[in-house]
Image (cartoon, rainbow, N blue to C red):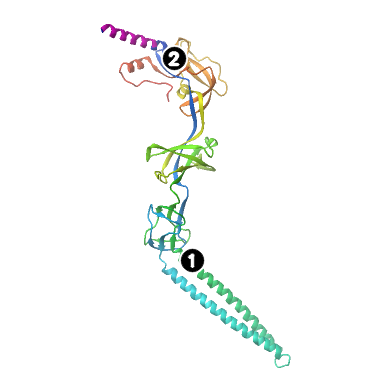
Amino acid sequence: MKKILAGAVLAAAVAAGAYLYLFRDDSGAVYRTAKVERGDIVDTITATGNINAVTTVSVGSQISGTIRDLYVDYNSRVRKGQVIARIDPRLLEAAVTQAQGSLGNAESALVRAGVTVNDANRTYKRNLELIKDGFVAQSDVDAAQTAYDQALATQKSAESAVLQAKGALKVAQTNLEYSTIRSPVDGIVISRSVDVGQTVAASFQTPTLFSIAQDLTKMQIDTNVDESDIGRAAKGQAASFTVDAWPDKTFTGVVSQVRNAPIITQNVVTYNVVILVDNRELLLKPGMTTNVTIQVKKYENILKIPNPALRYRPSEKTKGNGSRDVSKPREAGTQRLYRLGKGGKPAPVSVKTGVTNGLFTELVGGDLKEGDDVIVGEASKQASTMNSGGGPTGISTRGFR
């Protein structure tokens, strides 16, 4: 049993020695490596936004008055045409009565004007007959004609007064109808801005009494996409998002609009990308903040390298003893990373890269192939020994940022 235990300890020591021989150099650095592998990369756009109802209607009042009755409250479901509030109609009813009286007076004046016209017409015609036999003077005929013309003008004025009175009556009746507030759409009341007894004034602008979301089973997200990413956004792209209310659930949607109007906030330009969302479970509520990921394109079965490999640069110690970077200048469109070269020292490699998702980057060209190891970081020999021996775990990993 002791021989077996001794053999196991010896094998572990040999393995540890081999690791340190392969993955460290004389400067005392231990390198962390990762392999070039084949897989998928999804090109995405990340943004934040807010959930809103697709159609939200603000219900206001076109007349001033005091709220007498309220028939709905927050979260009330309403139907189109349903009475949701009523303004005290007494002054409006009095205005209708007054307008009806004015119309009656105008119609009476029109009747009197008609009688005057008929009388002036008869007098004028009679004088025309009498002047033939010399019974009246020409001045009498002229006076009769003048009276007839004036009667006609008075009749026209009375007709206009009747039309004006009818218009005033219609306005008064319409205002009385406006005292009854009805829902313009089917939906849910998401906000109420008035209480019973409150006075609303519609002198300068229409006051908003209610906000009604037409259909909360279909929502939209208004996102703020940075101008550097907006060129890759397009209608029909799939999107996923999370909300703080449901941190363990991922929701999905589809881009429906990429709006051209810029949104400038503190000299930062963004654009609104609208995403339609199915909310049949009613888990999402208007105003929720979202973290959105829009899938631009999926690259399948490609070579990819971890992004820390592109950020890693050898420390000053590991550059010594002939391991200094003396490679040729990089070509345009290439990046430099490092792998273990002769003597276990970092050797630079120029590669061409493609799309990235923040964790991995596509390997388009260069002197690397699938399965090759690339350096992603380094730690000092002392720190590595302390960590492996149960000491502190605060290892410096240059290259991870």
Residue sitting at x 34%, y 15%: 385
- What's drawn in magenta, residue-wise? 2-18
Q: Quadrant of residue 120?
A: bottom right
- The x and y percentages for residue 201 are 44, 61
Counting residues from the start of the chain, the first of labels 2 and 1 encountered is 1
Question: Relative to 398, does residue 293 appear above or below in the rendering?
Answer: below
Number of numbered discs present? 2
Give residue 371's position: percent from left, percent from top.
Answer: 47, 17
Magenta stretch holds residue 120: no
Q: Nearer the viewer, residue 36 or 161?
A: 36
Q: Residue at x 54, y 77 (%)?
A: 107
**Callout 1: helix, strand or loop?**
helix
Please determine whether, in this image, residue 74 is positioned above or below residue 144: above
Is residue 216 shown above or below 161?
Answer: above
Give the mark toward the camera: 2 or 1: 1
Label 1 amino acid?
A: Thr
Outermost residue, top direction?
A: 3
Q: How many other residues sit within 10 Å of disc 2, few (<14), some (14-19) or many (≥20)?
A: many
Quarter of the image for the C terminus: give it: top left
223 left or right, relative to 119: left
On the image, the x and y values in percent for residue 193 come to 40, 55
Pointer 1 residue: 174
- Marker disc for residue 320: none
**Type of amino acid under label 2:** Thr
Residue pointed to by mark 2 = 318
